[in-house]
Amino acid sequence: MKQIWITSLDKNPQVIGPLLALAKQYGLAADGHFFTDDPSKLAWQPPLEKLLDPAVGLWIIVGSQEPLTPSVGYGLSLLTLSLGQRRNLPPMLWLDPSGTLDNGQLPTLLQNAMILPLQAPTLGAKIVAAANRPAAPVIAAPYRMAVHANEGYGIWLEIGPGTELWDGSMVGVAGAGKIAFQGVGPAGQLPQKTVLEYPQQGLTLMLGTQEYTTWAVRNPITTATSHFVKIDGVPDSILFGPYTADEQAEVFVVQMGLIT
């Protein structure tokens, strides 16, 4: 039996109860949880093991604009990163009680989700169709982004190029987050020791009207190595890319909260 997992941003059993019943009515094994907003204490991690089950063919997120704060978006983004590191992401369906959200407003890592109003006609049939939709093909990205997190060492982001060599790397945060440490080492695991070439901290980088506090290293970053940064607090967005001293830089930006 095809399984679905439901994440509700609104702790309202009158929303989740009927949705679980509807899924079961259409022959789907449904389970889920109420999302806990506490990213620094890794409250986003508990549903990861359920979502890693290959039998889960659809991840449903229920929420409107109001509960989608930067903190909630950051937690959902970290959960999505963790899931994508260990399996192909299942199809995602975002059910919006307000009926006003569009994909461009979602956190960057969730923008591939299909959005439907929670009260959409024939919702049950649409959930079945989404659950039987094949997973999206994996498209090679120009960058790598991963997360390493536990209560002991906190939250670290791993950044690197997808295919090309970076002559150094820089990572910046905006909002209520900050970078506390950085390192360079083999991809896929936090380095036990690191030697940084020309490390820089606290650089200010402007992208439009958004200010990012940026840390950088000049170590060559290959597909086999990564730049690691420890993140404290809740960033609104993360900026990263190859190091450059020029005013014009090629960067990637991952938004964490509601994009207005």
Image: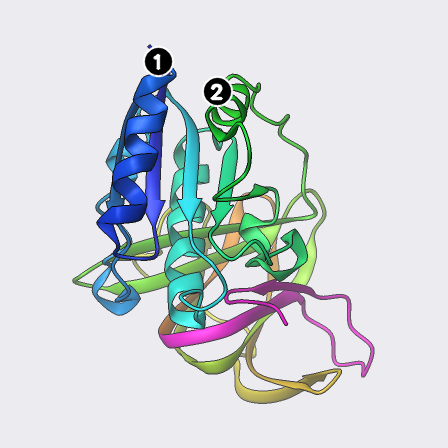
Q: Quadrant of the C terminus?
A: bottom right
Distance Cα–Cα, label 1 vs label 2: 8 Å
- Left or right for 142, reference 195: right
Residue at image position (61%, 66%) is 240
Q: Residues within 10 Å of mark 1 (few under 14, many from 20)?
A: few
Number of marks in the rendered image = 2
Mark 2 lies on a secondary structure that is helix
Q: Is residue 250 above or below residue 95?
A: below
Amino acid type of disc 1?
Answer: Gly
Residue 220 visible to an observer of this rendering = yes
Is 238 magenta? The answer is yes
Q: Quadrant of the N terminus?
A: top left
Q: Position of residue 242 (x, y in %)?
A: 68, 64
Is 30 magenta? The answer is no
Q: Which residues are magenta?
A: 233-260
Residue at image position (46%, 46%) is 187
The residue wearing badge 1 is 27
Q: Position of residue 26 (x, y in %)?
A: 39, 16
Q: Position of residue 34 (x, y in %)?
A: 25, 51
Residue 217, disc: none
